[in-house]
Image (tube, rainbow, N blue to C red):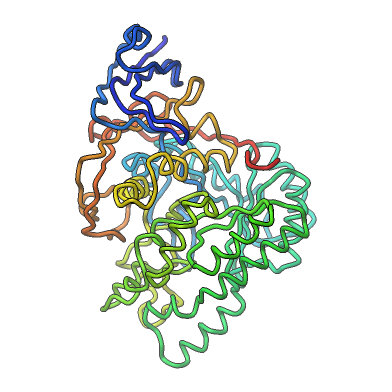
Amino acid sequence: MSSRTVIRGGLVITASDEIHADVLIEDGRVAALAATGTPAAESFTAERVIDATGKYVIPGGVDGHTHMEMPFGGTYAADTFETGTRAAAWGGTTTIVDFAIQSVGHSLREGLDAWHAKAEGNCAIDYGFHMIVSDVNQETLKEMDLLVEEGVTSFKQFMAYPGVFYSDDGQILRAMQRAADNGGLIMMHAENGIAIDVLVEQALARGETDPRFHGEVRKALLEAEATHRAIRLAQVAGAPLYVVHVSATEAVAELTRARDEGLNVFGETCPQYLFLSTDNLAEPDFEGAKYVCSTPLRPKEHQAALWRGLRTNDLQVVSTDHCPFCFSGQKELGRGDFSKIPNGMPGVENRMDLLHQAVVDGHIGRRRWIEIACATPARMFGLYPKKGTIAPGADADIVVYDPHAEQVISAETHHMNVDYSAYEGRRVTGRVETVLSRGEPVVTEREYTGHKGHGAYVPRSTCQYLS
């Protein structure tokens, strides 16, 4: 049984084009586009017709950095693959790439299998996996080759969190050398965790226990130093590097310098660094704990460098690093000791809207919005043109977006499984109206019509920015 849908009358926006066009969808894929009102468009027939007059028709968002059900600090991220992917869909994201975790002493395969088991049959939208490498040894390095062959083509390492995920420079170099050979992409959490632990210990000894000290000990210079070191190790290994959750002016400068040198170095930032600051971390009565994440929120003046980096393409991607912990019972684990506050913030539902607000505010243009939220993450992680664009042959992951609707972001109305919103009370212009995943309506005129198990696992090819 063939199924056809036509989306009529909208402004189709991709990373490269804007055109008033009708979109024909057949059997879960984009079959054709034709300028609205032309004979070609008039010839499109379908069982389901979606009127997008006055609306944008955009590719579904690709969030390349989420942590569903992630264990951290004695607890777990509050969103399951079921709740997290449903919330993502509500926010116009139709693909996530989550992080499977290798535990020290265990194989990559064990970690990957565990994450497949969590996700399979539970997702509302399509998903892929990166692999967190916590234990670099000869067996791990061999496994990296096997994972690349089966579509897990990116590997995350940590210069932070000694005793948990931390890798030393030698382990990082070995993994980078392997990635240089097998085509994988190394993703780096770039903070000098060894130095940060010293500063944490000293702050606690001085009685500095409030959430705001989380930001003060995780210094911007230690992010910049680690970013510089990761870049040079990647250069020695001849490997590409993707630095996650860049938050500081000084770190952006390191990435800019490396890219000016022609290195295959890429950077991601997140909405929390673009819209929030240390002012939030300093909120009284332990409220600042809601905003504890790593890298930490920075003083407001860092935001200008991040926006500039997104405009100049020294930063290429905006992902969420969605890792939600409830304020009640989870963030509260750190009352009296900021180092025990679970690191992470909710955001998978808010990214597309916040970035549209950035268009309204003049930080970026409409096509750049789609580029940093859809097309570039799809290319970066080997999903393009199946994901990230609206073109014949692409998966029909499409959002009908109302650019004029106003909304107020609030925990009372969001769909993430967390008891607060990092953007509580923020008024934004623009709202998701209808979401298709592979042609199937997941959100229909602001009603959830999806179901768990629709989302399929997507094996990925290697990074499409490497020559």
| Residue 255 left/right relative to 146 | left
- Residue 326 is situated, as x and y percent measured from the top left of the image, at 33, 62
| Residue 247 left/right relative to 383 | left
In the figure, residue 406 lies in which quadrant?
top left
Q: In the rendered image, which quarter contains the N terminus?
A: top left
Question: Residue extending furthest bottom?
Answer: 206
Q: In the rendered image, which quarter contains the C terminus?
A: top right
Q: For this rendering, which residue is in front, 69 or 252? A: 252
Q: For this rendering, which residue is in front, 388 or 327? A: 388
- Residue 119 is situated, as x and y percent measured from the top left of the image, at 48, 42
Relative vertical location of residue 187 with respect to residue 249 in this rendering, above or below: above
Relative vertical location of residue 322 with respect to residue 374 in this rendering, above or below: below
- Residue 193 is situated, as x and y percent measured from the top left of the image, at 59, 74
- Residue 307 is situated, as x and y percent measured from the top left of the image, at 43, 57
Relative vertical location of residue 31 with respect to residue 431 in this rendering, above or below: above
| Residue 459 left/right relative to 181 | left
State the residue at coordinates (46%, 60%). 306
State the residue at coordinates (47%, 41%). 371
Q: How many marks?
A: 0
| Residue 419 left/right relative to 110 | left
State the residue at coordinates (41%, 78%). 338
